[in-house]
Amino acid sequence: SACGGGVRLSVADPAARAASVTAVTMPGADALRDWATRECGVTLGVGLGAPDPASALRIAHMGHCNPGVLLGVLGAIEAGMIALDIPHGSGALEAAAASIARPA
């Protein structure tokens, strides 16, 4: 799946994706990782096994994780992308909130 600015999921096949982590390939991943840690206290994982680890990151969603935590991390990522002028599409937070709001 690709979004604006070259942000895409690292694993194209949804059936092959892990339930505990989301791997993303994007320009500026190293800078975003540093910004999120420094400005928001959010630690994003390095792109383990990625062809270009500086352009990849991992978002963990295991252990104590709830909708508020996920929305907070997504908000920190979006804020960092805005602060660092990393091109990206719009609507991610709204889509996440809508998904959480839908009855199971």
Image: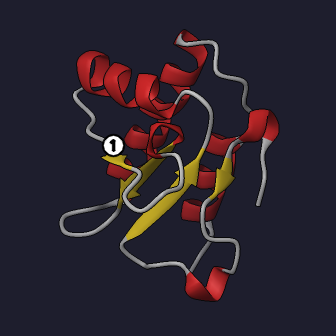
Q: How are the residues colored?
A: secondary structure
Residue 3 location, x and y as percent? 78, 45
Residue at x 80%, y 37% (from the top left corner): 4
Q: Is residue 85 left or right of residue 19?
A: right
Q: Residue furthest bottom?
A: 15
Residue at x 65%, y 80% (from the top left corner): 14
- Regarding residue 21, the answer to whether it shows in the image is yes
Of the 4 image quadrants, the one containing the C terminus is: bottom right
* Total count of labels: 1
Q: Label 1: few (<14), some or many (≥20) within 10 Å?
A: many
Q: Residue furthest front?
A: 51
Residue at x 55%, y 27% (from the top left corner): 28
Q: Is residue 3 left or right of residue 101?
A: right
Residue at x 27%, y 69% (from the top left corner): 62
Camera-nearest residue between 76 and 32: 32
Is the residue 93 above or below the residue 49 in the image? above
Is the residue 24 above or below the residue 102 in the image? above
Quarter assignment of residue 7: top right
| SS category of the residue bearing label 1 | loop
Residue 80 location, x and y as percent? 48, 21
Is the residue 104 above or below the residue 10 in the image? below
Q: What residue would you read off at disc 1?
A: 44
Camera-nearest residue between 26 and 51: 51
Is the residue 99 above or below the residue 17 in the image? above
- Regarding residue 90, the answer to whether it shows in the image is no
Camera-nearest residue between 78 and 8: 8
Residue 40 location, x and y as percent? 29, 23
Quarter assignment of residue 92: top right
Residue 11 location, x and y as percent? 61, 70
Q: Given the image, on which type of amino acid does mark 1 rest?
A: Leu
Of the 4 image quadrants, the one containing the N terminus is: bottom right
Q: Is residue 62 left or right of residue 88?
A: left
